[in-house]
Structures are given as structure tokens and as C-alpha cells.
Image (cartoon, rainbow, N blue to C red):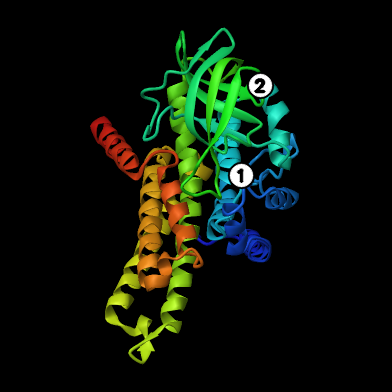
Amino acid sequence: MNFDFTDDQKMLKETAASFLHEHAPLAHCRAILESDESYSARLWKQIAELGWQATAIPEEYGAAGFGRLELAMLAEEVGRALAPIPFVSSVYLATEALLLAGSDAQKKRWLPKLASGDAIGAFALAERPGQNGYTGVTAALDGGSLSGVKVPVVDGDIADFVVVAAVAGDGPTLALVELPSPGATVTRLESFDPSRSMARIEFSGVPAEPLGAVGQGRALAGRLLDRAAVLLAFEQVGAATRALEITKQYTLERFAFGRPIGSFQAVKHCLADRWCDIEIGRSNCYYGAWALEHDAPELGAAACLSRIGASEALDRMATDMIQLHGGVGFTWEFDCHLFYRRAKLLSTMLGTTASWKHKLVERVSAVEEAA
């Protein structure tokens, strides 16, 4: 059995890394963070010309028609660059929601626009900070009209449409709402990571259409989050790897007591521990990518493992990055806080690490009981 990537896949990853190195240095992320812009429209257009948004969209909708494995490889490079673009919301969530449950008409209308980068999508689940799942959702879909409040909605202020978790007469459902729309009030929120925007969206009798079967919203949302969790985990691994590389280089250049601080045992042990965290997370991500690519029964558990391993790896690396840089690590001028901000944001998207651990226990227990 061959566990290596194909030559074409390796070329795709190398090309993506080279492009982002040239067009999306960390200075670009910082520029968006320090501006009033919600995202980098220039970078979004450039990657659309390369077909990144279209990676996993079928060819019948005018897209690339590759697979989730190729998309995962791109996600890792997007994470390495801390790219200030709505890749998670539009590609991992909105696009996957349409592929998973969209009608033919919905797919024909939105997928070509998503593939070309002309439309940005978002997913609205939470109705309060700290909400990790469908429990507590009160937004109501009644006769094609949606009412309720969603907060926070990542990239909700720039979205052309949003997939909303709601309840209807027949039970939980997903609804598709075009933005802007009469009755929809979008308010941009302050974010811990200003290079990624968030919004509060209030729906007051907004026209909406069901996405998928009414009453199946909870199950569809669960499957959607599993898919997105694997792809988001690759972003986290990419960011953690870049943070480790930067920190390692700094410890080799920073001298104390006449020698590089990277030669001190405590520093070496810390970096070695973080390397282990990242490689464990990467291994879990590869398992998740395989399960996602083949829509395997193991996807539920694999998504949990990917999410947990990658989140913990990036959280720990971002924290130690600041510590190992010493006093300058806490300053605005150094890039450490860019990784720390992104780590904290990504660790709460799609649910906290603790909630994914809880899911993993439930899913493994269910398999054991069934056996």
C-alpha cells in the first residue's frame, strides 16, 4: 500500500506554498489586521484565478473536480500563511453544505459562483458565545420565512448567502438565506483576530429556503461539521508548523551568555515537545483526509481526532512561541501575536476542543455498544 502523495499532488502543494510565500507574507495578514478591511479581496481574487475555491466542486458546475485530499493540502498552506481570506466559511462550510444537501437548483445557482470566487458563503449555527452544537438553536423557519439571531457568524459581514441552522414545524432544518435581504440586519463585531471578521445577523421574517430535508437539520449539520473539521485541522497544522519554524530560527539567532538560546536544554525540550504535538496532529489529519476522501464510516471519529490533535498542537505552539521569543514575543512588532490570535480563533470555530473530545467519547462508545 502506498501512503505517499502523487507527483501531481506534490506539485499542487509546492505551487501553493510558492504562491503564498510571494503574495501572502505575514506582513499581508498584519496589514489586514491593522486595517478596516474584513478580508483580503486581492488575495481572494488571485486564488480564485488559480481555482482553489473550486478544488472539490464537481466539473459539471464549471469547477476543478479534484478531491478533498487536494483541498486539504491547500488548506495546510493557507494555514501556514495565516491567509486573511474566508476560506473556512466559504469553502469548507458553505460549499460543503451545498454539496451535501443542496437541491439541483441551489447547486446550479451557487456552486459556479463559489467556484469562481464571485460569491462568498457562511454558516450560522451559534446563537450565543460558547455554543458548540445544535442544542439551544431557536431561529425559526416558518413558511419560507426565517426569524432569529445568529452570533457570532464568521465572515457573516461579507457573505453573499448564509446557511442557517434553524427549527421548523417538522424539526431541525438548515435554511439558505441570500444577503443582503429585507429583514436581515448584519452587524460587524470586534474579533480577537481582526484578520478574520465576525458578525451578528438578525433575521426578521427574511425569505429563506430549506437546504436538505426538513427535520434532518441536526444530522446534516453534524455531517457538515465533521467535513469542515478535517479541513480546518489542516489549516491549524500548517499554522503550527510555520510557528515552529520561525521560533526555531529565532532560538538559533538569539544569543544569551555567549551561546544561542536554542542550545539550552529547556528550550530544546520545549521545541521537541511541540514538534511531537504537530506530527501527532498531522498524522490524525491524514487519517481524517482519508476518511473524508472516501466518505468512510470512520469519518466521525477521524474528524474528532483531527480536530483535537490539530487544535492542541497550534494552541501549545502559539503559546510557547511567545514564551521562547522572550520579552519581544509580547510586542506588537513581532509576529507571535498573529499566530496566537489565529490559534484562539480557530480553536473555537466549529466547537471547542473539549466539545470534540466529548463527541469522540460518544462515537467510540456507540461503536463499542453496537459491537
What's the residue at 43%, 25% (across, down)? 219
Q: Which of 164 and 356 is in front in this view?
A: 164
- How far separated are the C-alphas under marks 1 and 2? 20 Å
How packed mark 1 is, by other alpha carbons closer than 10 Å (few <14, some 14-19, many 20 or more), is: many
How packed mark 2 is, by other alpha carbons closer than 10 Å (few <14, some 14-19, many 20 or more), is: some
Q: Nearer the viewer, residue 37 or 166?
A: 37
Residue 325 at x, y percent in the picture: 40, 72
Name which of mark 1 and mark 2 comes first in the sequence.
1
* Residue type at numbered disc 1: Ser
Residue of label 2? 181
Residue 283 at x, y percent in the picture: 41, 57
Residue of label 1? 38
Residue 164 at x, y percent in the picture: 53, 25
Q: In this view, does 115 lie above or below 32?
A: above
* Residue type at numbered disc 2: Ser
Can residue 290 be seen? Answer: no
What's the residue at 44%, 39% (across, down)? 350
Residue 330 at x, y percent in the picture: 41, 65
Could you say which quadrant of the image residue 81 lies in? bottom right
Judge from the rendering whether residue 86 lies leftward or rightward of residue 355; answer left or right: right
Q: Is residue 152 above or below residue 14?
A: above
